[in-house]
Amino acid sequence: MLSKILIANRGEIAVRVIRACRELGITSVAVYSDLDRDSLHVRLADEAYALGGLTAAESYLDTEKILDIIERSGADGVHPGYGFFSENTDFARAITARGVTFIGPPPEAIEVMGDKVSSRIAAQEAGVAGVPGTTEFLTSADGVVAFGEEHGWPVAIKAAYGGGGRGMRVVPSADQAAEALESAQSEALKGFGRSECYVERYLTWPRHIEMQVFADTQGNAVWVGERDCSAQRRHQKLIEESPAPLFPDEVRQAMGEAAVKVTKACGYVNAGTVEFLYQDDEFYFLEMNTRLQVEHPVTELVTGLDLVAEQIRVASGEPLSFAQDDIVRRGHAIEVRINAEDPAGGKFLPSPGPILKLRVPQGYGVRWDGGYEAGDEVSQYYDNLVGKLICWGADREVAIARTIRALEEFEIAGIATTIPADLAILRHDDFVAGQHSTKWVEDRLDLSAVGAGAIAQATDAEGDSPEPKVRRDVDVEVNGRRFGVTVWVPESQVGAVVSGGGAGAGKASPRPRRSGGASATAAGSGNVAVPMQGTIVKVLVSVGDAVEEGQTVCVLEAMKMENNIAADKTGTVQEVKVEAGQSVGSGDVVVVID
Ligand code: MV4
């Protein structure tokens, strides 16, 4: 077995791999950018090495820096996670040349599956069909028209070297072929440096169903189970589940066998995923993802397998620990990706920032794979996946109810998250009925009423990193009903809003004031207000007195403490609005200074 694994990644997937290493007795090595110096994956790993840099290119994607740390740490394996180096054959070859194991497939398999045309040909040769279409590149719109006339409209023009839907155009009829081809080619050239396109029948309401496969170095290859990832927006998956709803057993079996054929045909080893489109009881090969995927936990929850541990065993040269017939799928699992994005109005705007509060749900059938804890910051420089909530239930109905319950328990503050959109999907009749497709979120789901969820404290208006915040628990009364609320106060304003957390009776300010005012914005107005409801026990000034900023003007008893209420500016007392023994409410002005 490998004995020391460097995880060339960050966030939740680095955490996932580090945990697997710990359970297997393997030493884990984290790497981190300057921004991730104190991040969760660094805290959990056995060892951690600085990469320096802020952006991914300056840190996690810097081959020389990672190679240097592999050498210094003595790691004998590298787990790339997903993204970054996971499908980078230069990187895989560079570490292999140094005698270090790449925990992933052979570079040749990554290459075959690396572009749409060569993977389509490989699948076809293995006897697995893609959507009916051509494999020749289009030279003119005539090819599109001829195909459409023969197979029917609409057709899809796709960029051969494209990905993620870029360079794809739907052509509804012959008269739009020329324009669509031109725009697909130009987008492909801009995005991928190559303009080659081909044509396929366009499926109008497909589901995205993918099959998890696993192969070892001894020639064993199995399919583990499918995941339905149709609930996505702009090619970003939002929710994944297994088994796929309304998916007949015999189709599952056939898709699994097709996926194994593709796996064997490209000499695949380790964990992989074969993607299909599924429509009208037929499935079509789309592409193969030659990495561990974000959504692998749903397969783990229904099979009880540990796919990351299996990856490490297989990379160590061991045979698969299970045969095809050993795999038992039980119940239903749903994964919800929780991203730092504001889904308000369906816009999904990035919402990086400090996580001020994070309480994740617990209870039966609930798993949280997170990359952050409260106090950590989601940086704008990287993927904004905060973590994944994965729920298991005896059947789909239970799993949906449990996922909703868990999301309702979720407490996060400081950043907006996709949770409100996730709930809208899970509660929607179409989703519950399994009537959604890859286009459903964008075409049918109405997110106009979805709000951001409370962002307790955003960064300041200039977008600078915010001043450190201090937590204060305050009791407030709203229409006579008492509520406990938490406020996060900029450090410089501590003592202004509410005096320190209960200790130090009689002192309003636990530390010297900088502004001396009731709050930073009100500082110097001369209207001295009390910060909370209570009783005035002493008035120390009279009309006409000269007072200095910070000087106590009266004493308020509240929450069994005496609080000194200070002048917010230097001047003369114009008005004293209270007397000893009088009750006051939060925000009441007690003294006016000018
Ligand atoms: C399609 C299709 C319908 N018909 N091909 C988009 C990204 C690329 N990987 C494949 N994609 C699609 N190809 C034909 N012939 C619909 C999609 C598609 C899609 C596929 C998988 C997951 C999400 C999707 C969202 C929109 C469109």
Image (tube, grey):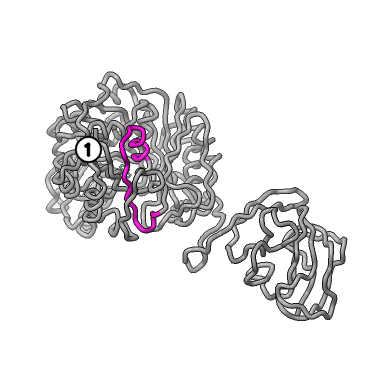
Query: Does residue 485 lie above or below 276 as drawn?
Result: below
Q: Which quadrant of the structure image shows residue 224?
A: top left
Q: Residue furthest top?
A: 325
Quadrant of the displayed image that contains ligand 1: top left
Ligand 1 within 8 angstroms of badge 1 C-beta: yes
- Along the viewing direction, whichever of 22 and 278 lies nearer the viewer: 22
- Along the viewing direction, whichever of 387 and 181 lies nearer the viewer: 387
Q: Is residue 175 visible?
A: no
In magenta stretch: residue 33: yes
Relative image position of residue 210 (x, y in whole percent): 30, 35
Magenta residues, start to end: 16-37
In magenta stretch: residue 372: no
Query: Does residue 486 lie above or below 285 as drawn?
Result: below
> Quarter of the image containing the C terminus?
bottom right
**What amino acid type should be assigned to the residue bearing mark 1?**
Val
Badge 1 marks a residue whose secondary structure is loop
Number of numbered markers: 1
> Quarter of the image containing the N terminus?
top left
From the viewer's perspective, tell me whether residue 369 is left or right of residue 556. left
Relative image position of residue 490 (x, y in whole percent): 58, 62
- Along the viewing direction, whichever of 125 and 386 lies nearer the viewer: 386
Residue at 41%, 34% (x, y): give it: 435
Residue at 82%, 59% (x, y): give it: 535
From the viewer's perspective, tell me whether residue 297 is left or right of residue 152. right
Relative image position of residue 375 (x, y in whole percent): 50, 52
Query: Does residue 225 lie above or below 168 as drawn?
Result: above
Residue at 26%, 47% (x, y): give it: 73
The residue that label 1 is drawn on is 131
